[in-house]
Image: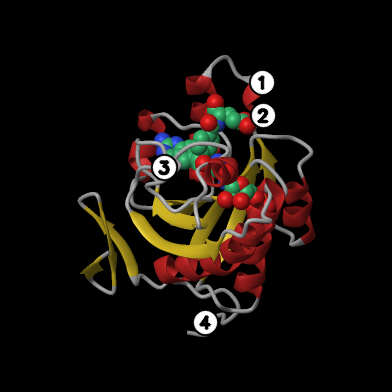
Amino acid sequence: MIQSTSVESNSARIVVLISGSGSNLQALIDAVDMGAINGEIAAVISNKPGVYGLDRAKKAEIPAVVIDHRDYDGRAAFEAELSKTINSFSPDLIVLAGFMRILNSEFVQPYEGKMLNIHPSLLPKYKGLHTHRRALENGDKEHGVSVHFVTAELDGGPVIAQRKVKVENSDTEQSLQEKVRQQEHQLYPEVVAWFCSKRLEYKNGQAFFDGEAL
Ligand code: NHR
Ligand code: GAR
């Protein structure tokens, strides 16, 4: 039997959730295009209409769906539609890339071990929002970014990998965000590639890389 080489049968199906500019999405699109990830982005879903990340998806000919949380009566109704849409793409991996809605444990539970988030701090420091501002206010000398498995606990799932940046006296919230984002664009495709090649796994609430607990 002749097998297509363009879409490998073992290629992981990835669904990316965004809320904004989608620069991390772009880094993933580019990595897939370069063959650095053994996977394909099956869909991009945004909870915000009109964001630039949706344009990036369309340009890459990836199905782009908007599920505006404001159209739903409460988080549960929004999440029901979100999970229905995610499941319709049969993903192996769900990637939160600047996704800005807190997700209920009921939503997260079925995806545990196959959902990743990138968070702009050196977790467990600065869970939640405004991480760059908080690092500056505390006079931190270093700051950075973490990729973790998503669990019910907000920004509390097992950390997979981190990248650090130096904080200079001259740094502002904006300059720090830019520095961190450059690291994000290298780190996230790398971690997604590990997952898609099955080097990264999740068992009993722990992350494993090449069979070793992280
Ligand atoms: N959900 C669960 N259960 N677990 C995680 O680890 C999650 C999650 C949902 C999102 C991303 C997270 C981040 O990286 C994330 C991780 C949004 C907020 C927030 O307060 C906090 C953390 C994260 C994302 N959102 C407000 C809300 O009421 C809305 C803020 C806005 O729209 O600007 O949902 O930081
Ligand atoms: C990224 O810096 C990401 O770490 C952060 O939002 C930015 C999204 O940028 N995520 C959060 O703050 C999650 N609460 P992008 O849309 O250009 O990828």
Which mark is nearer the camera, 4 or 3?
A: 3
Kindly identify the amino acid type of the residue bearing the numbered disc 2. Answer: Asp
Q: Which mark is drawn over residue 3?
A: 4
**23 or 142, which lies in front?**
142
Looking at the rendered image, the quarter that the C terminus falls into is bottom left
Q: State how far apart marks 3 and 2 are (Cα).
A: 23 Å
- Residue 46 position in % (x across, y down): 65, 40
> Which one is earlier in the sequence, the residue at label 4 or at label 3?
4
**CB atoms of marks 1 and 4 within 8 Å:** no
Relative side of 198 to 80, left or right: left
**CB atoms of marks 1 and 3 within 8 Å:** no
Point 34% across, 72% down: residue: 199
- Residue 31 position in % (x across, y down): 61, 72
| Label 3 CB sits under 8 Å from any ligand 1 atom | yes
**CB atoms of marks 1 and 2 within 8 Å:** yes
> Which one is earlier in the sequence, the residue at label 4 or at label 2?
4
Q: Which mark is drawn over residue 155?
A: 3
Q: Residues within 10 Å of mark 2 (few under 14, many from 20)?
A: some
**CB atoms of marks 4 and 2 within 8 Å:** no
**91 or 205, which lies in front?**
205
Which mark is nearer the camera, 1 or 4?
A: 1
Secondary element type, mark 3: loop
Kindly identify the amino acid type of the residue bearing the numbered disc 1. Answer: Asp
Which mark is nearer the camera, 1 or 3?
A: 3
Q: Residues within 10 Å of mark 1 (few under 14, many from 20)?
A: few
> Which one is earlier in the sequence, the residue at label 1 or at label 4?
4
Point 66% across, 74% down: residue: 33
> Which one is earlier in the sequence, the residue at label 3 or at label 2?
2
